[in-house]
Image: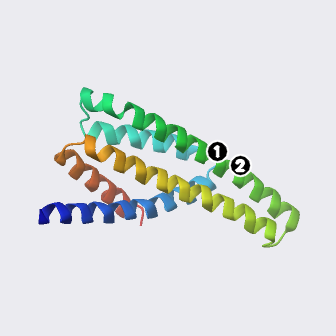
C-alpha cells in the first residue's frame, strides 16, 4: 500500500513537471510562425504511443480519450494563435506595454494554462488503461523530455 502512495506521489510530481514543460512548449509555440509546434506535438504523441507499445486493445480504449484531447488541443492552439495576432496588433497600435497589450498577453497565458491542464487531464485519463510498465515508461519519457528542455 505504501508503494502505491509513493508511486502516486512520484507521478503527481512528474505531472507538475509536465505542466512547466507545457509552459516551455507554449512559449516556443508563440514564437513559431510556421506552426511547427503542432507538427512536433503530434509527432511526439505518436512516438509516445510507439514507445509504450500500446496494444490493439489499449488503442481501442484510448480512441475516445485521444479524440477529446486532440479536439481540445487544436482549439486551444487556435486560441493562442488568435491571441498572438491580437498581441501583434496591440503592440503595433500602442507601442508600449498598454492595457491592450496586457489583455492580449493574458489571453495567451490563459490558453497556455488551459492547454497544460488538458495535457495533464489526458495523461491522467490514459493512466488506468496502461500497464504498470507502460506507466513507468511514460513517467521516464516525460522526465527525460523535461530535463532536455532546461
Q: Residue furthest bottom?
A: 97
- Residue at the location (38% across, 31% down)? 63
**Camera-nearest residue between 19 and 24:** 19
Mark 2 sits on what residue?
82
**Camera-nearest residue between 10 and 144:** 10
Q: Residues within 10 Å of mark 1 (few under 14, many from 20)?
A: few
- Residue at the location (26% across, 40% down)? 129
Q: Is residue 137 above or below residue 146?
A: above
The label on residue 16 is none
Q: Real-space Cα distance between discs 1 and 2?
A: 6 Å
- Residue at the location (40% across, 43% down)? 44
- Rendered image quadrant of residue 36: top right
Query: In the picture provided, is 36 more to the left or to the right than 65?
Result: right
Q: Residue furthest front?
A: 1
Q: Is residue 36 above or below residue 8?
A: above
Kindly indicate whether the residue at mark 2 contacts the one at mark 1 (C-beta within 8 angstroms): yes
Q: Residues within 10 Å of mark 2 (few under 14, many from 20)?
A: some
Mark 1 sits on what residue?
78
Residue 89 in the image: state x and y as whole percent.
82, 56
Query: In the picture provided, is 60 more to the left or to the right than 107?
Result: left
Q: Secondary structure at mark 2?
A: helix
Q: How many marks?
A: 2
Q: Is residue 111 above or below residue 77?
A: below
- Residue at the location (36% across, 60% down)? 15
Q: Secondary structure at mark 1?
A: helix
Residue 122 in the image: state x and y as whole percent.
40, 47
| Quadrant of the snapshot with the C terminus | bottom left
Residue 149 in the image: state x and y as whole percent.
42, 62
Query: In the picture provided, is 78 more to the left or to the right than 89?
Result: left
Q: Is residue 144 visible?
A: yes
Q: Is residue 148 visible?
A: no
Amino acid at each position: 500500500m505504501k508503494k502505491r502512495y509513493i508511486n502516486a506521489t512520484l507521478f503527481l510530481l512528474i505531472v507538475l513537471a509536465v505542466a512547466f514543460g507545457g509552459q516551455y512548449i507554449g512559449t516556443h509555440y508563440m514564437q513559431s510562425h510556421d506552426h511547427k509546434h503542432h507538427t512536433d506535438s503530434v509527432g511526439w504523441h505518436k512516438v509516445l504511443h510507439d514507445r509504450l507499445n500500446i496494444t490493439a486493445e489499449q488503442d481501442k480504449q484510448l480512441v475516445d480519450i485521444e479524440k477529446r484531447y486532440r479536439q481540445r488541443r487544436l482549439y486551444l492552439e487556435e486560441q493562442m494563435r488568435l491571441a498572438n495576432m491580437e498581441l501583434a496588433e496591440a503592440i503595433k497600435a500602442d507601442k508600449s506595454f498598454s492595457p491592450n497589450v496586457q489583455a492580449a498577453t493574458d489571453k495567451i497565458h490563459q490558453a497556455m494554462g488551459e492547454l497544460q491542464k488538458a495535457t495533464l487531464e489526458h495523461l491522467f485519463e490514459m493512466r488506468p488503461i496502461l500497464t504498470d510498465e507502460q506507466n513507468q515508461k511514460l513517467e521516464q519519457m516525460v522526465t527525460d523530455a523535461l530535463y532536455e528542455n532546461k
